[in-house]
Amino acid sequence: MEFVGFTLRNNLFVAPMAGVTDRPFRQLCKKMGAGLAVSEMVTSNSLLYGSAKTKRRANHDGEVAPISVQIAGSIPSMMAEAARHNVDRGAQIIDINMGCPAKKICNVMAGSALLKDETLVGQILSAVVSAVPDTPVTLKIRTGWDKTNRNALTILKIAEQSGIRALAMHGRTRACGYTGSAEYETIAAVKAEARIPIIANGDITSPEKARFVLDATGADAIMIGRAAQGRPWLFREIEHYLKTGTHLLPPRVNEIHAVLLAHLEDLYDFYGIETGVRVARKHISWYTRGLIGSAAFRHRMNQLPDIASQQQAVNDFFSGLAEHDEHLSYIPTDQNNDSEELAA
């Protein structure tokens, strides 16, 4: 797929998610079949550029191109400087966050709160595009502020006039958060008017749903967030289904065990021991979500204080699974309520 000047493996994108789409997760999803992975949002506040968290989020060492970095903020000049700062540090695509519904973001008039102020939206987009003229700039939004104020079509026109190269839409309003069903009809209406690529996001949890969303919206690509937490192989499953119309077999126990262990090693290396152990807990929880015996396992695992005991617990759990079934069988879970993290 050709996308804003880059040739991608496919049109399956990893959604930016705060606390999730760090470099290890992005790399893993690309390895498992994603064509593009957008970073978790990076602050536009230059006072925080030196913080450990911001430095980690701007770390792209060894990352497979293209490197897409999402920036968040509400002051045009600061957003412009953030774009330049990240391009200087390796970003090849700048993505602007106007989709995050989290209160801590919206309370400072950033994220999806910006959709209320269309004039400010235009000022931010123009400032960022002008700041990095040789770097494509993309935008992530929601369908509007609430169900009586859906202004995605207006934002599309502002984006196109500002020089935005692609628009990703989560099919819910800011007020909806992650409740209810995604509004694919709104995405379809925007796509029908668009002169730039449109990426559909929201509730894409299976190969069949991916096919349905592409057909229903006419979108150029789809963006997957929460469904990939603990299931990075979802991208290869969707890729295969879209190409062939047939399903891959579920992953084998030993493969998932190996993927998780490698992911944990990357997390320990990326974050350091103390933070790495803490971050690893939620990923282990997601990998084992819906598996037989996982609730009790997660409770015990969350009490473990170090790398060795964490790895041993994972080995013991998956060894037990392997004795019963070569392929993993998941118990369905409520994706809307099972995640504490927020997709931007």
Image (tube, rainbow, N blue to C red):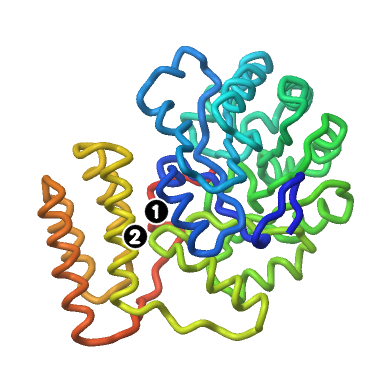
User: At 61% from the left edge and 27% from the top edge, which residue is drawn?
Assistant: 87
Q: Amino acid at mark 1?
A: Ser
Question: Which x, y percent locates residue 170?
Answer: 64, 50
> On residue 69, which mark appears?
none
Closer mark to the observer between disc 1 and disc 2: 2
Q: Amino acid at mark 2?
A: Trp
Residue hosting label 1: 339
Q: Quadrant of residue 310?
A: bottom left
Could you say whether the residue bearing mark 1 is in a helix, strand or loop? loop
- With 2 as the anchor, is 232 left or right in this view? left
Question: Which x, y percent locates residue 277?
Answer: 21, 45
Question: Which x, y percent locates residue 15?
Answer: 56, 50
Circle count? 2
Q: Is residue 59 visible?
A: yes
Q: Quadrant of residue 167?
A: top right
Decide which of 9, 291 is in the foreground and name it.
Answer: 9
How dense is the environment of label 2, judged by Cα within 10 Å: few (below 14), some, or many (20 and up)? many
**Vertical comparison of 178 with 241: above or below:** above
Q: Earlier in the sequence, mark 1 or mark 2?
A: 2
User: At 58% from the left edge and 71% from the top edge, which residue is drawn?
Assistant: 238
Residue hosting label 2: 286
Decide which of 204, 334 is in the foreground and name it.
Answer: 204
User: At 47% from the left edge and 43% from the top edge, which residue is drawn?
Assistant: 62
Could you say whether the residue bearing mark 2 is in a helix, strand or loop? helix
